[in-house]
């Protein structure tokens, strides 16, 4: 079955993903004829390798993290269901993104009463634009990792507490013995430093097509 022509309705929406090597797996029979080891192991390796990229793609279309995680699980289940049809001469991620797109559509149908749901044509345009921007986004993520590594330990810890642990500014300010306003200013400064670093890095990589361009 080609997922570009069908949203694979036979997938069980909302069903939790069961690892392929689990004898209780419910999403189809294990693929046969896979070279290089058990198919469940191959599938698990591919999913682990690409799950963050799949989640980033899904979150472009479904901004709420919890909803995106749910769609990722549905996508993994659908991919396992159709894994016997995977052409191993082609990259796994583009194949997986097509299933993710249809799982987003299925999820949207369930949430159709939500006033924030985009029209399907708008969603398709967002998805297409997201794929076109992927090389640039990859470059920015790589630059961001390098720039964050240059931060002081204290600044890096503050970013992690604020954005990874979701600690409130009030809590962080109280722990540091500072006002919330002072902490907001510090966060703004850190973000500005990181932004300028990423911008310089990307500018150095871009072809210099304009006279007088400088970094």
Image (spheres, rainbow, N blue to C red):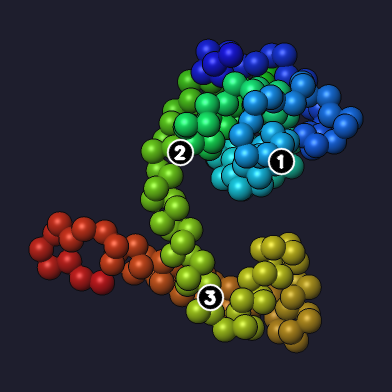
Real-space CA distance between mark 2 and mark 1, rounded to the nearest whole angstrom: 30 Å
Q: Which mark is residue 130?
A: 2
Viewer-closest of 10 and 141 = 10
Q: Is residue 164 visible?
A: yes
Residue 31, x across and y down, in percent: 69, 25
Q: Nearer the viewer, residue 181 or 14?
A: 14
Residue hosting label 3:
149
Nearest to the eye among marks 2 and 1: give it: 1
Task: Residue 70 in the image: state x and y as whole percent.
Answer: 74, 36
Say which label, 3 or 2, has the lower sequence index.
2
Q: Is residue 214 above or below residue 65?
A: below
Disc number for residue 41: 1
Q: Secondary structure at mark 2?
A: helix
Q: Residue at x 71, y 36 (%)?
A: 38
Could you tell me which residue is drawn at 63 percent across and 71 percent down? 159
Which tag is nearer the camera, tag 3 or tag 1? Answer: 1
Earlier sequence position, callout 3 versus callout 1: 1
Q: Which mark is residue 148?
A: none
Residue 192 in picture, x, y percent from top left: 47, 71
């Amino acid at each position: 079955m080609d997922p570009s022509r069908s949203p694979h309705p036979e997938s069980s929406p909302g069903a939790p993903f069961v690892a392929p090597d689990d004898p209780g797996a419910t999403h189809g029979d294990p693929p046969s004829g896979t070279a290089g080891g058990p198919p469940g192991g191959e599938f698990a390796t591919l999913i682990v390798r690409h799950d963050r990229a799949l989640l980033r793609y899904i979150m472009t279309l479904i901004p709420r993290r919890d909803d995106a995680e749910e769609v990722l699980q549905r996508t993994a289940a659908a991919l396992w269901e159709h894994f016997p049809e995977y052409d191993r001469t082609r990259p796994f991620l583009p194949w997986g993104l097509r299933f993710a797109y249809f799982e987003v559509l299925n999820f949207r149908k369930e949430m159709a009463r939500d006033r924030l749901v985009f029209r399907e044509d708008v969603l398709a345009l967002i998805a297409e634009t997201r794929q076109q921007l992927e090389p640039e986004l990859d470059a920015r993520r790589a630059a961001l990792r390098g720039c964050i590594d240059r931060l002081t330990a204290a600044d890096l810890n503050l970013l992690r507490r604020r954005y990874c642990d979701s600690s409130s500014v009030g809590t962080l300010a109280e722990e540091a013995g500072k006002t919330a306003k002072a902490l907001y200013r510090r966060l703004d400064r850190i973000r500005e430093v990181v932004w300028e670093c990423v911008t310089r890095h990307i500018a150095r990589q871009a072809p210099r097509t304009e006279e007088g361009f400088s970094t």
